[in-house]
Amino acid sequence: MLNLFNTHIDSLSIHRVGNKSRNENVFLSESTYSLTDEIVPLLKEFFFRPFREKEENYFQFAHDVDLEYNEMFNLATEVFT
């Protein structure tokens, strides 16, 4: 389980990459944006939510019956033979 309680966002740099087909330029911020106490929880929720939602979606490549039924084992054996 991922514990994101102690994560901290100090500052933010905002850049914009334009669309080349529309001849839009690249915008790079001159300085970092200092965050206020009001916006930090919102940014943490926005940036770290995908990690919380995906934390239970681990893949297991084991088979309870026998190793010969394990698909990854069979594919790896095929590759290395």
Image (cartoon, grey):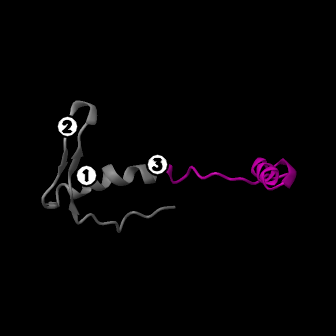
Left or right of residue 61, residue 20 in this image = left
The residue positioned 42% from the left and 49% from the top of the image is 50
Looking at the rendered structure, the secondary structure element under dot 3 is helix
Left or right of residue 1, residue 40 in this image = left
Q: CA distance from mark 2 to mark 3?
A: 35 Å
Q: Position of residue 58 (x, y in %)?
A: 60, 53
The residue positioned 21% from the left and 59% from the top of the image is 12
Q: CA distance from mark 3 to mark 1?
A: 16 Å
**Tag nearer the camera, 2 or 1:** 2
Looking at the rendered structure, the secondary structure element under dot 1 is helix
| Magenta segment | 53-81
Nearer the N terminus, badge 2 or badge 1? 2
Q: Tag on residue 42?
A: 1
> Residue 17 or 5: which is nearer the viewer?
17
Name the outermost residue toward the top. 22
Dot 3 corresponds to which residue? 53
